[in-house]
Amino acid sequence: MDSPKSKFKTLEIFLLSLAHFVHDVYTAFLSPLLPLLMDKLSLSLTRGGSLAAVMQLPSLINPLLGLLADRVNLKYFVVFAPAFTAIFMSLIGLAPNYLILLFMLFMAGISVAVFHVPAPVLIARMAGSRKGLAMSFFMVGGELARTVGPIIAVTLVAMRGLDGFWPIMFAGIATSGILFWRLRNVDLSIHKSTKNLALSRTFINLKHIFLPLAGIIAARSFMHGVLTTFLPTYIKTQSGNLWLAGLALSVLEAAGVVGVLIAGPLSDFLGRQKTLAISLIGAPVFILLFLESSGIWQFLALIGCGATLLSTTPVMLALVQEHAKESPATANGIFMMLSFVFRSSIVIFIGFLADRLGLHTTYFISALVGMLGIPFLFFLPKKSN
């Protein structure tokens, strides 16, 4: 039986999921605007990929943020991150050159890091025994943001131009204000353990989780990078239509919302390992179908890509949290670092491949590499300790 403190705290989970939605709307601006930014600043696909990578570079400090979050209350980091991310991401259209754009994205990346490390741990501690369900709610906020974010971005650019959509930042600032007002008296302490484990000790204690997850994340990052970063560029290259490019990304992310809603609760019932297997087998197949089909079939394949590929994160988060008994935030920081480092480095490599082989061939290669994550599933524990 769960204690009263471990009950599912619906209101707080909803507010933090809402914050996740607003925050990630702004981070979703980069991919649909990438073709325009590349044209404006005369960037290659390799440099275009580096824009997404530099935004994820601050993830290197995620374990340190997690270590800090296990010792002090980082509630206000989560509260104010939507405002800071909104400011920097709303200004990228004004960047006069490549270096200034890199700086803006790096600063946004710092804000992303200080939000995404403590927030899932807060969610897990407010979920009781239903961590998979709570992680699905939280991740729906992020996936839904990446669904509407591209539409918001291309609509605003069509209305106001690349350098005129900056006033959208005020929505993020207002969200942080609302969160501050509603959560100022709410105790969102993450962990109050007298055992302050070292970063290395946390990794050693959870290496049976992190090592196979690293293999899964690396393989998944090829599929994730080529779809979420370069899908608008791929569609625009094929069709010449920026609206269609933004719509394709929104369809992908909308399917991800459905996948996330299903995957978290399903993993509570079926098990984390089996749920991840469904996703990791399905995603490469749907990517290959997307490449070899057209019309409505290509549209349906894209839905399959989103539903399978984007549904793995809440399952992996729940897996980490249910095994991290003594240092949950540190464990989440290590997981987030692994995820972001693989994604940021691989997306540059994907851009390098695309410059030389073309995006179509790069998609094909990424799907094949994605299949290499399947054997790592057998090394994951089937149940928590």
Image (tube, rainbow, N blue to C red):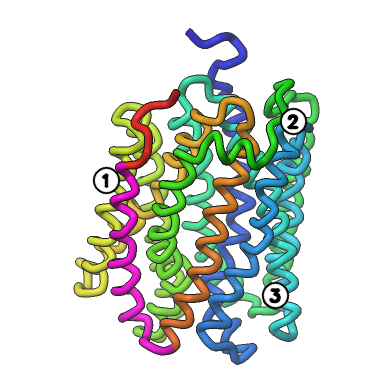
What's the amino acid at mark 2? Answer: Leu
Quadrant in which the C terminus is drawn? top left
The residue tagged 3 is 102
| Percent of width and height locating residue 165 | 68, 71
**Quadrant in the picture for residue 363:** bottom left
At 73% from the left edge and 80% from the top edge, which residue is drawn? 95
Of the numbered discs 2 and 3, the one sitting upstream in the chain is: 3
Measured Cα–Cα span from mark 1 to mark 2: 38 Å
Dot 3, crowdedness within 10 Å: few (<14), some or many (≥20)?
Answer: some
Q: Nearer the viewer, mark 2 or mark 3?
A: 3
- Circles 1 and 3 in contact, beta carbons < 8 Å: no
Which label belongs to residue 252? Answer: none
- Whether residue 325 is visible here, answered yes or no, is yes
- Looking at the image, residue 94 lies above or below residue 311: below
Q: Which residues are magenta?
A: 356-378
Classify mark 1: helix, strand or loop: helix
**In magenta stretch: residue 367:** yes
What's the amino acid at mark 1? Answer: Ile
The residue tagged 1 is 278
The residue tagged 2 is 183
Measured Cα–Cα span from mark 2 to mark 3: 33 Å
- Looking at the image, residue 102 lies above or below residue 27: below
Of 219 and 212, the residue lying toward us: 212
Left or right of residue 150, residue 86 in this image = right
| Percent of width and height locating residue 134 | 50, 31
Dot 1, crowdedness within 10 Å: few (<14), some or many (≥20)?
Answer: some
Left or right of residue 21, residue 375 in this image = left
Classify mark 2: helix, strand or loop: helix
Dot 2, crowdedness within 10 Å: few (<14), some or many (≥20)?
Answer: some
